[in-house]
Amino acid sequence: PEVYRLEPHLDWPHRIFSILIYFSSTNSTTGGEYITYKTINGTPTAQDYISTKPNLLLSHLSCFPSSWHGVTPFKGPGMRKLIQIQIS
C-alpha cells in the first residue's frame, strides 16, 4: 500500500528556500523520489527524479513561480526519514 505521496506543488510565496537532509534511501522500486518539474504551457511536467540516500542534501529556491516539486508515491519498506528546513 502507498504510504506517502506529494503531488506537484509550489511552496508558500513568502518562503525563500527549502533544505532537505535525507536519512533513508529511496528509488524507483520503493518510491519516494524527489521530483523537479518544468512548466510547459502552464502545466508542471516531471523533469528530474532524484533517488535519495542517507546524508543527501537537496535545496531549492522556493520563491520562484517555476519551483515546482513533489514526491513519487512511497511504498516502503520503512519510512521516508528527513529533516526539512525552511527559510522565509
Image (spheres, rainbow, N blue to C red):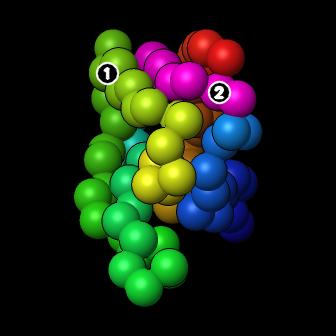
| Identity, as a three-letter code, of the amino acid under mark 2 | Arg
Q: Are marks 2 and 1 in contact (CB under 8 Å)?
A: no
19 part of magenta stretch: yes
Q: Nearer the viewer, residue 24 or 70?
A: 70
Q: CA distance from mark 2 to mark 1?
A: 22 Å
Which residue is at 41% across, 71% downward? 39
Regarding mark 2 in the picture, which secondary structure is present there? loop
Q: Position of residue 41 (x, y in %)?
A: 42, 85
Q: Position of residue 42 (x, y in %)?
A: 50, 79
| Identity, as a three-letter code, of the amino acid under mark 1 | Leu
Disc number lying in front (2 or 1): 2
Q: Which residue is mark 1?
A: 56
Regarding mark 1 in the picture, which secondary structure is present there? loop
Q: Nearer the viewer, residue 31 or 18?
A: 18
Which residue is at 67% across, 17% downward? 88
Report if residue 75 is visible in the image: no
First to last magenta residue range = 14-22
Which residue is at 36% across, 27% downward? 58
Name the quarter where the N terminus is drawn: bottom right
Sequence-earlier tag: 2 or 1: 2
Tell me, for residue 29, which label it has, or none: none
Q: Which residue is mark 2?
A: 15
Q: Position of residue 21 (x, y in %)?
A: 45, 17
Report the side of 55 relative to 33 (left or right). left
